[in-house]
Amino acid sequence: MTAQDKYAVFGNPIKHSKSPAIHAAFAEQCDQHIQYRAVRVEQGDFQRAAASFFAGGGKGLNVTLPFKQDAFAFADTVSDRARRAGAVNTLTACADGSIAGDTTDGIGLVRDMVANLGWQLQGRRIALLGAGGAVRGVLEPLLREHPKSVVIVNRTAARAAELAELFADLGAVQGGGYELLEELEVDLLINATSAGLQGEMPALPDTLLTVRSCCYDMLYGPEPTLFMRWAAQNAAWAVADGLGMLVEQAAESFYRWRQVRPATRPVINQMRNAMAAA
Ligand code: NAP
């Protein structure tokens, strides 16, 4: 191990990435001497940039939009969960020179909901809004918690139906358009659409939540998101944003690279305070 092992996150855009601050906090807390940079990679240049990073002694990469599928193709080996998700957000240089790919988003989400928020998933009726990369990445870890049922709804219904079919061997999972939510009650509603980025949210029936329902938005920001405000107005029992998921997926990457597990709660608080002050 060198004095400062090199790590980075590749994405585009990357300017607002919180990963360097999160990993710096982990490194300080765990007394690890690492360098972690955010690198903007041009579309079509991922393979070259990643090969050059590892050839230059890089130890590990996080990969964010729009390169998670390129990272999957780049890895020499991938974990089972990454193979099923068809996406990789963590690349690790192995001792034999090969590059291993994994996806830690799903573990991050489950850990935030179960360990940090104290929400139970087992036996619960879950609905997921959206059928993009985020949903694909979290379905396996979610289904492994043995919920009673998972319904995926999406603006483009066929994408949700396709995902449901792909994960059907892991539990009771159904996919389709938003009409699947009519006359449904759920215990956990997860927003994994990017609608909030455009200041929008899908129309949802006001019969969807019960007094015990939890609502989770993968999006996060200094203010409650539109989805979180809808959940509060509809008397959700608990509401959370995705900052904890972000920190937890980073912690899992850090653990893979350094074999040390950082305490996440102080880092979530630190990031929350930094967002509020910005
Ligand atoms: P993505 O692959 O681009 O998928 C976007 C999804 O949102 C699609 O299902 C799309 O539906 C849907 N959508 C977009 N605009 C919509 C609208 N106006 N109304 C209804 N549905 C709409 O993105 P992703 O990677 O899955 O990410 C989804 C969200 O999760 C993003 O906000 C991202 O920031 C967040 N995220 C957070 C974390 C975290 O650590 N907290 C990690 C990963 C992702 P169509 O299929 O019909 O286009």
Image (cartoon, rainbow, N blue to C red):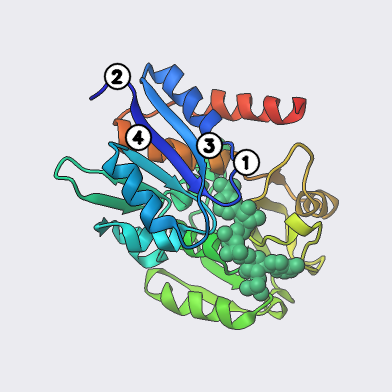
Disc 4 CB within 8 Å of nearest ligand 1 atom? no
Q: Mark 4 points at which residue?
A: 255
Q: Mark 2 points at which residue?
A: 3
Residue at the (72%, 47%) spot, across then down: 237
Indicate which disc, 4 or 1, sits on the residue closer to the N terminus.
1
Mark 3 vs 4: CB contact within 8 A: no
Q: Which residue lies furthest to the right in this view?
A: 233
Disc 3 CB within 8 Å of nearest ligand 1 atom? no
Element at label 1: loop
Q: Which amino acid does label 4 sit on?
A: Tyr
Give the CA distance from mark 3 to mark 2. 21 Å
Q: Which of 42 and 252 is in front in this view?
A: 42
Element at label 3: helix
Mark 4 vs 1: CB contact within 8 A: no
Q: Mark 1 points at which residue?
A: 15
Q: Is residue 125 something that shows in the picture?
A: no
Mark 3 vs 2: CB contact within 8 A: no
Q: What residue type is labelled 1?
A: Lys
Image position, residue 137 (x, y; %): 47, 60
Q: Name the residue under label 3.
A: 19
User: Looking at the image, how many numbered discs can be counted on the residues?
Assistant: 4
Which of label 4 and label 2 is nearer to you?
A: 2
Q: What residue type is labelled 3?
A: Ser
Give the CA distance from mark 3 to mark 4. 14 Å
Disc sitting over residue 195 in the figure: none
Residue at the (36%, 32%) spot, across then down: 6
Give the CA distance from mark 4 to mark 2. 18 Å
Image quarter for residue 141? bottom left
